[in-house]
Image: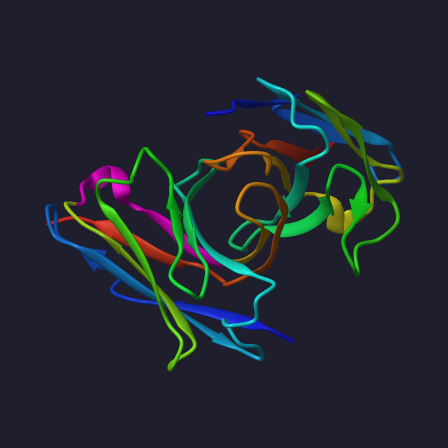
Amino acid sequence: DIQMTQSPSSVSASVGDRVTITCRASQALSSWLNWYQQKPGKAPKLLIYAASSLQSGVPSRFSGSGSGTDFILTISSLQPEDFATYYCQQAYSFPRTFGQGTKVESK
Amino acid sequence: QVHLQESGPGQVKPSQTLSLTCAVSGGSITSGAYYWSWIRQHPGKGLEWIGYIYYSGSTYYNPSLKSRVTISADTSKNQISLKLNSVTAADTAVYYCARDLSTTMTGLGLDVWGQGTTVTVSS
């Protein structure tokens, strides 16, 4: 299985801050990497697919970059509704695997 | 707007079979563009992909669960089902179904999710 490692596990930030979350894969994925946002008690929501493509309806302050083994999710200006847990997921091979999550908390 | 709704018993006894259904509305599971996945999330933990199915019946299961899991599709009811047998407390989790923008190898993510259903394994 491909192991996905996110860093940091949590980040404390304020509204307006730029937030970056890193995801590293145990083997190269090309660009087959997706990002999700999950709020407490809710299902995950697809934010970014194929490493850098913004899912329809997702605000443009979210962006993704990277290829191969190293990927980044950036929130350019954190909004109150962005406090949540973020997961990366590899979609290069089976079984699909997720990172352990990064919790974005209020500073 | 496609909507997914999971349903099933909230509690299952150890060694028994967990059975869940995912009803799909607003679209057909026979749309050739999509696979349909099951994912679970243990309490306070991350996400685990269980497996997926294409409407034709083609499946792929996570090897960690393969010996115990069956995913099926009922095109007449437009729903997907999950069966997990010989459950233990370790199978206690929130179970989600999701529309999967996958192919037979790579994928573009899980773009529509159900709200999830909590299953507790306890006697």
* Position of residue B82 in the picture relative to residue A18 (left or right): left
Q: Residue at x 68, y 35 (%)?
A: A105
Quadrant assignment, res A102: top right
Q: Is residue A7 above or below residue A36?
A: above
Which one is nearer the viewer's eye here, B10 or A25? A25
* Position of residue B60 in the picture relative to residue A11 (left or right): left
**Where residue A97 appears, x then y in whole percent?**
51, 34
Q: Residue at x 82, y 46 (%)?
A: A79
- Tell me if residue B90 is in the magenta stretch: yes
Which one is nearer the viewer's eye here, A7 or A81? A7
Quadrant assignment, res B9: bottom left
Q: What is the span of residues highlighted in magenta in the rendered image?
A: B87-98
* Position of residue A33 in the picture relative to residue A95 (left or right): right
Q: Which quadrant holds the N terminus of chain B?
A: bottom right
- Please identify the residue farthest to the top as the structure is shown: A26
**Where residue B14 appears, x then y in whole percent?**
12, 46
Quadrant assignment, res A89: top right
Which coloring applies here?
A: rainbow
Number of numbered discs = 0
Q: Is residue B63 above or below residue A47?
A: above
Q: Residue at x 60, y 49 (%)?
A: A39
**Where residue B70 appears, x then y in whole percent?**
27, 53
**Where residue B8 appears, x then y in whole percent?**
29, 66
* Position of residue A69 in the picture relative to residue A90 (left or right): right
- Tell me if residue A93 is in the magenta stretch: no
Q: Residue at x 37, y 39 (%)?
A: B62
